[in-house]
Image: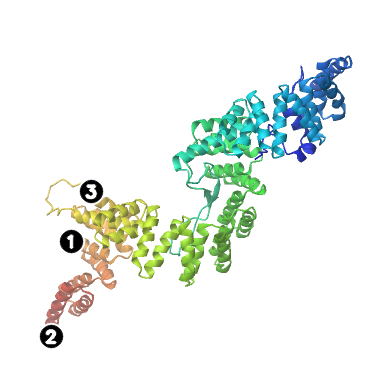
Amino acid sequence: MVFMGDRATLLETGRFVQRHARNAADEIIEAVGAVDTAVDTTAETDADTENETETEARHRRAAERGDLAAMSALGALLLRRGDLDGAEPYLRGATAEGDRAAANNLGVLLHQRGYAEEAAGWWRVAAVAGSAPAAHALGRHHRERGDEPAAEYWLRQAAEQGHALGAYALADLLEHRSDVGAERWLRAAAEQGHREAAYRLALALERRATETTRGPHETGTRLRVPGTGAAVPSDAPATAGAAAPGRAAGEPGGAPAEAEQWFRQAAARGHRRAALHLGAILEHRGELKEAGRWYLSSAKEGEAKAACALGFLLRDAGDEESAAVWWLRAAQDGDGNAANALGALHAARGEQQTAERWYRAAMDAGDVNGAYNLGLLCAAQDRIPQAEQWYRRAAYAGHREAANALAVLLLQAGDANGAEPWFSKAAEAGSVDAAFNLGILHAGRDDDRTALVWYERAAAAGHTEAALQVGIAALRDGDERTAERHLRCAAGGGSAEAAFRLASVLDARRPDPGPAVLGAPREEKTECEEWYERAAQQGHRRAQVRVGMLAAGRGDLAEADRWYREAAEAGSRNGAFNLGLLLAREGSEREAALWWTRAARAGHGRAALRLALLAARRGELTEGRRWCARAVELGPAEVAERAARLSEALHQELTA
């Protein structure tokens, strides 16, 4: 495999001849005498030009006198300048006199003219004489022709003489054959300043560390490339997600120190991909300022992924406008992730047509997230047929969340049989939402056993609602320990229902506190009360009532009033009933009656009985009998029995 990203790599023969003559000269012309092999004629000053002119004149005078070293040096100088006609007679003359460097450089000249076999002949002459550059060039020549044994022989000759290009080319050949010796020569080239070797050595070290951590059969890359998140419509039988782009999840924990060192060395030498990787490592570690510096360096060199990553750093820092500039630059260079980011940015601003245009650009760039995001965009606009079309396109391309979203659409349309295989495909590909949705699908068919299997799979991956369902199933089966474990996971994940049910499990274990003792110190809140409060703070009405009851039991009537009132105002009939009791005990019977009325109308039998008793005490016998009838209707049994007796007594009073 030939890597094109470094000047220190020879290029393919055809393009080498016409487009990279100057690079060839810089790479494989052998230094001769006082000739400066590092001259870059594209950036010469007037003084440099004058010095080179003087040097050329001096060498030319000496060469005309028959000076072998001057002939070789003048030929190298003219060759480097691209003056092949002028260089050839001097190089041939010096070669005829046995000059090793001239033989190598004559090979370079002939190679540039397209005479590859004749060039190889002169490289062989120079290489046998001990020229490392010639051995390197000859090795590359043989590799281009598929003769790997000969290529390895000559590249090894160059590498063992300390030739950086030879060491790199040998490493590339060995790596192509999966030979473990490749790393040794990559390291040798990197230690001599070869930036592509440093970059590839860093990748190898990082890959080995990743395989050690994750196992040889797991996949993943350290590089954090922005992508898109996953979402389904909020009314679908799945957890809600977000359609905005974000960084991919599940990266390894960071590059080893040695890999980072080599990434840094390559990046410092201008290797844009190394700068991108170094930025990703630093960002992962939280060193955002330096990460941004390396992303910027890479982006300025034309690395679209770095421009995209820089955009995300800027967005996270609150500079959305600058982020959009870099995303635009990356997207115009064909980066699908950046196009998706721009689409999400415009969608969030309500600019749907522009968003759609960028999502299509992402898709055209080969990013399947573009099709998925187009589906999300259409679904948000109730363009369901178009949404299904884009979801299908992404799903067929292997996008697991698109498969899940497609299944949701089919399920909402009543096609459960059509939805199931897409849910299964998404779940098998790792979609946690799809696994949960399969659980819901099977539960709807009364297939609780299969539903539980999928719930357990989703719960094991951290799905909050799935963990709640597993906890509920365990409670139903009497397995309190398993139930508590899953309820804790779900409650910790933010499920108010799980927090309430966990609190109920813990509450049932508490010993009876006994009657309150006046003057006794107030007890600290128990764990179960803390879970009740967490659920209550999330708006769980039953938890709010329970927290109010616990507060009342501690004698904290103000706290009890607050929670009862919050639950009652949210529609809890138990909250309204208990608030009425609290108010009545405090002497606010009129307000209590208002809350009991609300509770009774919502179906609370005890509230209806309280209203009947209140009416009876006020002498409103007909009103009392009406509430008695309501209490008998609502129950429970003991309430109905008491209400019936009270109604009979009121009837007798009315007819007396």
Farthest residue in the left direction? 656
Whether 129 is drawn above or below 470: the answer is: above
Q: Would you identify the image quadrant in which residue 189 lies? A: top right
User: How far apart are the two marked residues, 1 and 3, measured between alpha carbons?
Assistant: 24 Å
Residue beneath label 1, please?
585
Q: Quadrant location of residue 369?
A: bottom right
Q: Earlier in the sequence, mark 2 or mark 3?
A: 3
Q: Amino acid at mark 3?
A: Lys
Residue type indicated by callout 1: Arg
Residue 10 sits above or below residue 405 on the image: above
- Residue hosting label 3: 525
Label 1 and label 2: CA atoms lie apart by 33 Å
Residue nearer the viewer, 612 or 211: 211
Callout 1 touching callout 3 (CB < 8 Å): no
Q: Position of residue 318 (x, y in %)?
A: 53, 44
Quarter containing the C terminus: bottom left
Of the numbered discs 1 and 2, the one sitting upstream in the chain is 1
Q: From the viewer's perspective, is 199 left or right of 562? A: right
Q: Which element carries disc 2, helix, strand or loop?
A: helix
